[in-house]
Image (cartoon, rainbow, N blue to C red):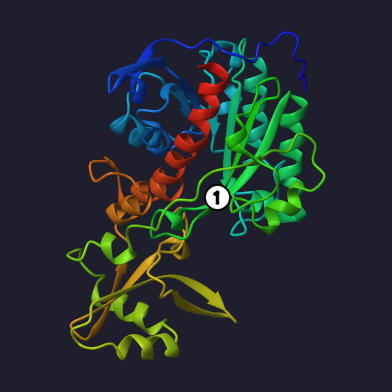
Amino acid sequence: MNIARENSTLKPAISGVIGVPSSKTCGAPALRPRLDFLEFFAGSGLVAQAMKGIFHPVWANDNCAKKAAVYSANHPAENFHLDSISNVSGANLPAAPVAWASFPCQDLSLAGLAEGIHAARSGLVWEWLRVIDEMPQRPGLLVAENVAGLVSAADGTHYRALHQALTRRGYRVGAMLLDAARWLPQSRQRVFVVAVDERDQIPMALEDSGPNWLHPAPLRKAAMGLKGWVWWSLPEPGPRPHSLSDFVEWEAPYADPDTENRNIQLISPKHAKLLNSLPTEKTFVAPGYKRTRNGKQVLELRFDNLAGCLRTPEGGSSRQLLVIHANGKLRSRLLTVREAARLMGAPETYKLPGSYNDGYKAMGDAVAVPVARWLAEKLLLPLALATHG
């Protein structure tokens, strides 16, 4: 792979201006360059949703027509490129200071076959880097997002391969593990890799001298001894404003009686006893997934008012169920598409065309909006303004 830098300018052009408040001008709008971004593996557009008012999308791609339909229903479609990244040429892309890639996770997920970052699907990250290499003006700021297995699987080997590929290209790199549960009632850990041109000065407030709340043990282990590593520093978010019960569509229909009865029978006796002991007037929701344990199918519930991590609905075990105690009875149904969208931080106005499975997949295979927005506001925007403003 050609990673020569002499023919590639890392600092891109920036177009236009937008107004932002400034205390120095008593509330009058200050002008700053419009900060564009490119989004690879854009899916259903939740990153673009998170970036609104911060970065301006000028190009996006995905190879899934159904996800493209969701993206286009909610964002300008003229810059969306429906095709495999393998067919994308960097020479044809517009210049932008930021490029985001939520590359496929199947080969890095603990729920998958864990074939690694060089396998067919997750290995598309190397196609992303090829495209970056081909750009006449490469972005000075790169973001790669994936599941926690990127840093925890194979003793961090997969992350280290990506990190070293980025440092060879002239970037300083750091990774963070953020759980959507800090913002939303969904347990969803994701790794965010942020790389910045090594020739740019990182503001002191954005870099720590060692690990902090962003760097749990698996990530610290993966980072050990790496050259060009950055301990990113971000403020912690405040208390989560909502619990799962706030996001439930209480009027949604339950499953048909036979399906509902089968679901209830799969609950462990311990959990069923706990639910049945609730007062008649108590309304309570417990989310769960069907699992096979010791050769038997069970419905594993959680009682912390958090949904489990949303996944794509490929196989019945990937569809999250809700068990609801209401009027002294246990009822059950699938999580609705709107509930899934709420758990990802999508606004109520976010359009989800297509079937139930289409909408569920669009949300289950996306990036939680407030997590991406927190990263954009607290790290990406300050970095972009410091290096390109």
User: In the image, is 333 to the left or to the right of 113?
Assistant: left
**Horizontal arrangement in the rendering, residue 242 relative to residue 37 (left or right):** left
**In this rendering, position of residue 284 left or right of residue 177:** left
Task: Classify 108 as above or below 193.
Answer: below
- In this rendering, the count of numbered labels is 1
Residue 40 visible in the displayed image? no
Tell me: 312 left or right of 339: right
Residue type at mark 1?
A: Arg
Could you classify mark 1 by the number of other residues whose Cα lies within 10 Å: few (under 14), some (14-19), or many (20 or more)? many
- The answer to which of 15 and 148 lies nearer the viewer is 15
Q: Is residue 340 above or below residue 5?
A: below
Residue at 45% from the left image edge and 51% from the top image edge:
237
| Residue 64 placement: quadrant | top left
Q: Secondary structure at mark 1?
A: strand
Q: Where does residue 158 sit, x and y in percent of width and height? A: 73, 45
Up-down: is 308 above or below 18? below
- Taking the spot 30% from the left edge, 18% from the top edge, the residue there is 29
From the image, which quarter does the N terminus lie in? top right
Residue 211 in view of the camera: yes
Looking at the picture, tell me which residue is in the foreground, 366 or 255.
366
Which residue was labeled with disc 1? 190
Image point 80% across, 36% down: which residue? Answer: 227
The residue drawn where x is 46% and y is 33% is 42
Q: Which of the 4 image quarters holds residue 27?
A: top left
Q: Position of residue 385 (x, y in %)?
A: 51, 22
Toward the right, the furthest residue is 225
